[in-house]
Image: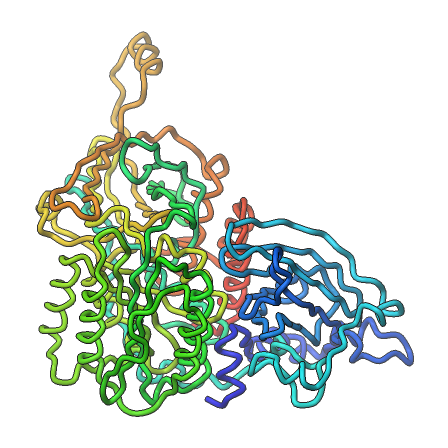
Amino acid sequence: MGPVASWMRAHGLTRSLSILALLLTPLVAGGLSYVSPSAARAGPGSDPGEETRGQINGVIKHAETGAPIEFALVVLTCDCFTGSREAMTNARGIYSFGALPAGRYTVRAFAGTGGITKIIELPVGAKFRANFSLDPEPERVVQIVVKAPPVASTAAAAMTISMEEAKQLPVGVRSSRDFTAVVDLSPTASRDVSGITGAETYGEIQERGFTKAAHSSTFSIDVDTASYSNVRRFLRDAARPPADAVRVEELINYFSYDYPAPNTTGAPFSVTTEVADCPWNPKARLLHIGLQGREIPAGKLPPRNLVFLLDVSGSMSSADKLPLLQRAMKLMVSTLTRHDHVSIVVYAGASGVVLPPTSGADQAVIMAALDRLHAGGSTNGGAGIERAYALARERFDPKAINRVILATDGDFNVGDVSQAQLQALIEAERESGVFLSVLGLGTGNLKDQTMEMLADKGNGNYAYIDTIHEARKVLVEQAGATLVTIAKDVKIQVEFDPAQVKSYRLIGYENRALAAKDFDDDHKDAGEIGAGHSVTALYEFVPADPKPDARTKRQRKRDAAQAPQPMAELRLRFKAPDAKHSQLSSFAVVDAGTTLAASSNDFRFSAAVAEFGMLLRDSKHRGRASWAGVTSLAAGALGNDPGHYRHEFLDLVALAQALPKP
C-alpha cells in the first residue's frame, strides 16, 4: 500500500471507483451515456472544475486565552458526499478543507471534551473561513448556522497564509504547490483492495440457531466495538468483510441509545426491555434488552495511571498505523490533568521505556516522546507487556484508573513467553486491579481473535481505530466508558415462558455464551460496563402456538382487565469494581403486542443494525432481510444523533449494497 493510500486509509476517506463502475455499468450496457453532475450544471463557456473548488478553512483558538489550539479535530460532513472528512489543526491552530462541491456542510470542531458545530451553506466554488473559539475543558456543543457568500464576494473571506504557515500544516494534508489544495482527498479516491485481508485472522463464529423455550439463555455482556469500525474499513475500501469479522453484537453496541439513566441509590446501570415485531421474520418477535451505565462527568473522573504499550515493529510504519496512533494519543494527552500519569513502553525486537511515569501537567514532555517514536524491527510483545505491567504497579493507586493500553496492528508475538503464561499474567494482573485494553490498527495484518482475547482476559475493551475521528470517539468522547469500570463480571440470563414462547435465539454474542451454572458462579469471568456505556442485546423469538380457548365470555373479560403475564424473566448478576461477590437483580418481561411501527427509535435502529449484520454474514436466519429494508428502518429511527454515527451507518449500508454478491 503506497503512502497516499495509507494516508487515505488513516483518514477514513477511501472510496473505490469500482462502486461507481458498478452503478454505471447498466447505463453503459443500455447504450446510455453518463454525464457528471458538474458537467450537467455547467453552462456554455463555464469551467466544470469550478464545481469542486470550494474551500472551508479557519483557525481554532482557546476561548479564554486566544491562543491557537494545536491538534484540535475538525470533522466535515455534507449532504453532497458520503462519510466524513477529518483534519487536525497545526501549531498555529489552522485547518483547511479544499476541493469541495456546493452543499450544506456540518463542521464540527473538537478540543479536549469541548465541541462546537457550525452549519455552512457553501455555493459553487465559494471559499469560507470558519473560525472557532473553544474551551477544551467543559463539554458543550453549540450549533451556529452561517451562510457562505456567493463566489463573486468571497475575496475577503478567502484565507491567505504565507509559505511558512503552509509548511506548518499537519503532514499529509498540506500540498507542495498551494494552500488551496490542502485537502483530504476526493470522496471518490480509491486504492487496490485485492487481497485486503492479507494475513488477517478472525475467530470462527458458529451462529446459533433457535432453541426451545424450555432452556434458559445465559451470556456475558460485551462492550467491545472493534467489529463495527473494522467492517467500516472494509466497506470504505469497497471490499466485503469476512463473515467472521462481523460480530453482530458489536455492530449494535457501537451506537449509543436513549436509555434512562440509573437512579442514584440502586445498581450502577438501568435496565430497559421492549418487545415488538421482527422486521425480517413475520412469524417472530424481538425482545430488546438495554443496560445504561451511570455517567461520570469529565471533571469528576478519577485520576488516570495509564501505561501505553505501543507496537513499533516494522509492520507499523504505514500511515494508518503508528502515525495515526501518534495523532490519536495526542488527542488524549490534551485532556490530561496534573492528577494523571502516563508512561510509554515500546516493543519491537526488544522492549524499552520511552517515557517513565509523567504527570499529565507535562503535556509537552509527553508529546515530545510521541514525536520520537518510529517503526522498525520485528515484534516481541511478551517482554513489552511484562514491562508495562511493572510500570503500572509502580504507580498503582487504588483510587485511580490503573490501565495498560496495548496498541498494535495485531502481530503480537510473545517471544520467550508462552501464550498460556501470557494469559495467566493478564488474568493475575486484572485481579490486582490493573486492567488491559487493546487498540487495533491498520490493514493486512490484523490478528483480531488474539486482540479480542487479550482484552477479554484483561477486563478491558477492544477497539479498532480506522480514522482519527474514531480515535477521538474512543480516547476522548468515551474516556469514561473506555477506562472507568462501574460494574464487572456482568452476566445476563433470560428464561422464557414455554406457554408463551415456542423457541428463541440470541442474536450475536456467540463467543460470550455461558453455561446456565456459570450464572451463579462468582469465579466465572464475564464482561464489564464502563461509565456512561450502554449494552444492548436482541432475542428473536417465535410465540407459542395458540391453544383452544375454553374460557367463558365472563372469564375472558376478567382476564383482559388483569395485567398480562410475563413472557420471560430477565436476571442480571454483577460485581462492584472492587468486590468479590456478585449482586442479583431480576425483571419481568411483558409482551404488550407492540407493532414495529409503534416501537421506539432505539428498538427499530438496533433491529436495522442486526439485519445489516446478518446480510453481511449471509446468515441463514436473515429471512426477508434486504438492504432496502435496512435503509428504510434505520432512516426512520435516527432520533437524536449528535455524533452523526447513525447517519454514517446509512452511508455504510449504501456501500455494502453496492458490493458484488458473494
Q: At x 27% / y 49%, what residue is drawn?
A: 506
Q: Is residue 333 left or right of residue 169?
A: left
Q: At x 54% / y 45%, what residue is drawn?
A: 640
Q: Position of residue 100 (x, y in %)?
A: 71, 72
- Residue extending farthest to the bottom is 377
Nearer-the-camera pick, 31 or 54: 54
- Residue extending farthest to the top is 554
Quarter where residue 146 is shown = bottom right
Residue 544 at least partly seen: no
Q: Is residue 116 left or right of residue 262?
A: right
Q: Position of residue 511 (x, y in %)?
A: 22, 60
Nearer-the-camera pick, 527 or 559: 527
Residue 395 at least partly seen: yes
Nearer-the-camera pick, 62 or 275: 62
Quarter where residue 26 is shown = bottom right
Q: How is colour applied across the structure in the image? A: rainbow
- Residue extending farthest to the right is 45
Q: How many marks?
A: 0
Q: Position of residue 508 (x, y in %)?
A: 29, 55
Q: Is residue 421 depicted above or below 67 in this figure?
A: below
Q: Position of residue 49 (x, y in %)?
A: 78, 80
Q: Is residue 444 depicted above or below 394 in this figure?
A: below
Q: Which quadrant: the C terminus?
A: bottom left
